[in-house]
Image (cartoon, rainbow, N blue to C red):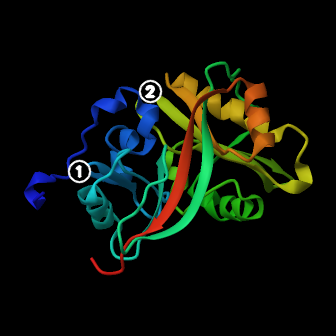
């Protein structure tokens, strides 16, 4: 297929009648266009925003080439999808993780009087909390993707949650984390409900992802009113070093 056949326009495939079937491309072809790019059937967030990208369920060589063009030589993406994909020669598999997608269709949302809005001035603290708690990728511009709320104690940020991928009609609750000294007090649940209230007020439906092995978190989310949408898969790949 020639380069002229692969115009990098942000169009949605027919399969995205359900935006949650490919949240990356649905978001970047829709509400979050300014945070990444769509090229052919591949999509990728900007590398300082979040490392997620996507390919179609059965990618051909041209799809992998489109993703390589978006990444640049040696760039790394976490590809979100259902099956593990066999990458062409030159690509380096780096990580593979089974996951679940859950939709907060029964989530009871409510604002939290102790939650504070987090922004650019809080990025250093947010990053430090993520590094201690490891909820998932959080990069310098991740906070720009949506509303991030936190709870402070004596000025210290001890818990936070926010919005990440936002396909049309939905918003992913992400970066739910609490300093280990303050776990077991329900802070994460409070912030999930508070971020969910922001999502619902906008008219969107909250959803989230979790590692399939993180049964504790999955149980909490079920208790809060999230139901299973689908199983999914996260696989990190490094693009060929030579374009």
Q: What element carries label 1?
A: loop
**Nearest the camera: 217 or 165?**
217
- Side of 20 where 172 appears, left or right: right
- The residue drawn where x is 55% and y is 23% is 201
Q: In this view, does 105 lie above or below 34?
A: above
State the quadrant of the C terminus.
Answer: bottom left
- The residue drawn where x is 82% and y is 40% is 187
Q: Which of marks 1 and 2 is nearer the N terminus?
A: 1
**Position of residue 152 measured from the top left corner of the image (x, y, whole percent):** 80, 49
Q: What element carries label 2?
A: loop
Q: Is residue 201 above or below residue 55?
A: above
State the quadrant of the N terminus.
Answer: bottom left
- The residue drawn where x is 73% and y is 47% is 213
**Which residue is identified by label 1?**
40
- Label 2, residues with CA under 10 Å away: few <14, some 14-19, many ≥20: some
- The residue drawn where x is 10% and y is 52% is 5
**Position of residue 32 measured from the top left corner of the image (x, y, whole percent):** 38, 44
**Position of residue 132 measured from the top left corner of the image (x, y, whole percent):** 77, 63
Q: Distance between the residues labelled 1 and 2?
A: 23 Å
Q: Nearer the viewer, mark 1 or mark 2?
A: 1
Q: Is residue 38 above or below residue 239?
A: above
**Which residue is identified by label 2?**
169
- Side of 119 where 189 appears, left or right: right
Mark 1 touching mark 2, by CB under 8 A? no
Does any portion of residue 114 appear in the rendered image?
no
């Amino acid at each position: 297929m020639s380069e002229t056949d692969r115009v990098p326009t942000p169009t949605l495939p027919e399969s995205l009648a359900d935006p949650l079937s490919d949240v990356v491309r649905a978001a970047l072809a829709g509400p979050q266009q300014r945070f990444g790019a769509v090229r052919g059937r591949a999509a990728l967030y900007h590398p300082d925003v979040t490392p997620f990208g996507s390919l179609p369920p059965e990618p051909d060589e041209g799809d992998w080439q489109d993703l390589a063009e978006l990444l640049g030589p040696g760039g790394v993406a976490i590809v979100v999808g259902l099956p593990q994909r066999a990458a062409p020669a030159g690509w380096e598999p780096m990580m593979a993780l089974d996951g679940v997608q859950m939709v907060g269709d029964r989530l009871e949302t409510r604002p939290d009087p102790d939650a504070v809005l987090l922004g650019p001035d809080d990025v250093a603290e947010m990053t430090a909390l993520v590094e201690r708690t490891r909820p998932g990728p959080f990069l310098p511009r991740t906070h720009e993707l949506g509303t991030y709320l936190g709870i402070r104690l004596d000025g210290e940020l001890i818990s936070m949650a926010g919005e990440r991928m936002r396909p049309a009609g939905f918003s992913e609750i992400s970066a739910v984390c609490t300093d280990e000294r303050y776990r077991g007090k329900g802070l994460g649940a409070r912030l999930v409900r508070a971020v969910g209230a922001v999502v619902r007020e906008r008219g969107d439906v909250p959803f989230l992802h979790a590692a399939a092995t993180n049964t504790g978190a999955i149980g909490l989310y079920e208790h809060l009113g999230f139901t299973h949408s689908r199983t999914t898969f996260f696989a990190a790949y490094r693009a060929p070093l030579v374009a």
